[in-house]
Image (spheres, rainbow, N blue to C red):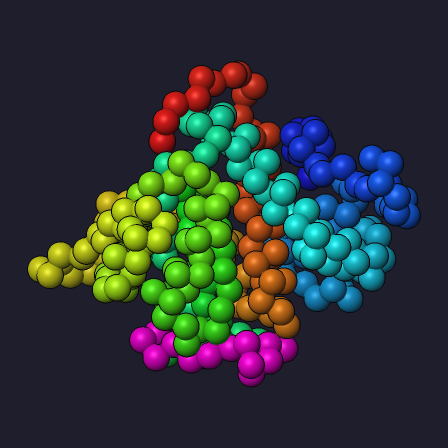
Amino acid sequence: MSGAEWAVVRDLLPVPGWLAGRGGRPEGFCHRQMIDAVRYLVDNGIKWRAMPSDFPPWPRVYAFFARWRDTGLVGELHDRLHQAVRRAEGRGPEPSAAVVDSQSVKADATVAHTSRGFDAGKRINGRKRHLLTDTLGLLLAVLVTPASVTDRDGARALLPAATGRSRRLARVWADGGYTGHLTDWTAQHLGLVLDIVRRGEDVRGFQPLPRRWVVERSFAWFLRSRRLVRDYERRTDTSEAVIRWSMIALMNRRLAARPHRPAAPSAG
């Protein structure tokens, strides 16, 4: 991280238990070193054992990564940065609309057979990333499943968790893969309007569709992190944590590059 990026993220870091007087062992390395190491791994797609000597030893970095994954601290940091970016863009801290989609990626040999599947539509053997973003393309919720899980089934597991955290959420845009019983289910159980954006029958080639292109751009952002080009993780929650770390780096850079000026929040 640059000095400007560290200045942004430093005040948003969760407070360790030992520093807040809740017990626990003090950490041997500062958070900036650990976050730099994790971001280097996500951005360059290296193995844990290939961590450069400039960073702390890889077992300590992995222990930091695993602890933040298991205790939800990476999600807490992500949500704080997300609210800061929305305020900087003149939006409210919680969105009222979102976009949902999925992405199937090939799985490495390290991924167990029990947590992978075959996406017959895209002919991919691996995992599927179910993503919910706000209208800025920023991550709201992510769920990693075997690629054989349908978009509708993935959304039924993804959307309840998102509505629990974003109570203002009222409308979700989706593609034709989410048609069917899911539309009525979201209205009855979640109070959400699921708006299907369809592709025109006479359209040939690529065409950015209203609202749907936002989440497609988010997938493109993730693929700039080499660790996310494929799924290399043994556990699905590790894959979800890597996705959050990729978005943390993106939001951190965006806030650091933005001139400091307060913005009045607006709905959206």
In the displayed orientation, state which residue is furthest to the left. 202
The answer to whether 56 is drawn above or below residue 94 in the figure is: below
Give the total of numbered labels.
Answer: 0
**Residue range of the region highlighted in magenta in the rendering:** 109-122
Question: Is residue 221 among what the camera can see?
Answer: no
The answer to whether 217 is drawn above or below residue 77 in the figure is: below
Question: Is residue 239 among what the camera can see?
Answer: yes
Percent position of residue 186, x then y: 32, 54
In the displayed orientation, state which residue is furthest to the front. 188
The residue at 39%/23% (across/down) is 266
Residue 157 image-quadrant placement: bottom left
Give the quarter of the figure containing the N terminus: top right
Query: Viewer-proximal residue, 242 or 58?
Result: 242
Percent position of residue 133, x then y: 42, 46
The residue at 44%/53% (across/down) is 160
Query: Viewer-proximal residue, 209 or 178?
Result: 178
Percent position of residue 224, x then y: 51, 54
The residue at 41%/53% (across/down) is 159
Give the quarter of the figure containing the C terminus: top left
- Whether residue 268 appears in magenta in the rendering, the answer is no
Task: Please state if 258 lies on the left or on the right of 124 as rendered.
Answer: right
The residue at 71%/32% (across/down) is 10
- Whether residue 119 appears in magenta in the rendering, the answer is yes
Percent position of residue 138, x then y: 46, 43
Query: Viewer-proximal residue, 51 or 161?
Result: 161
Task: Please state if 45 lies on the left or on the right of 162 as rendered.
Answer: right
Residue 42 image-quadrant placement: bottom right
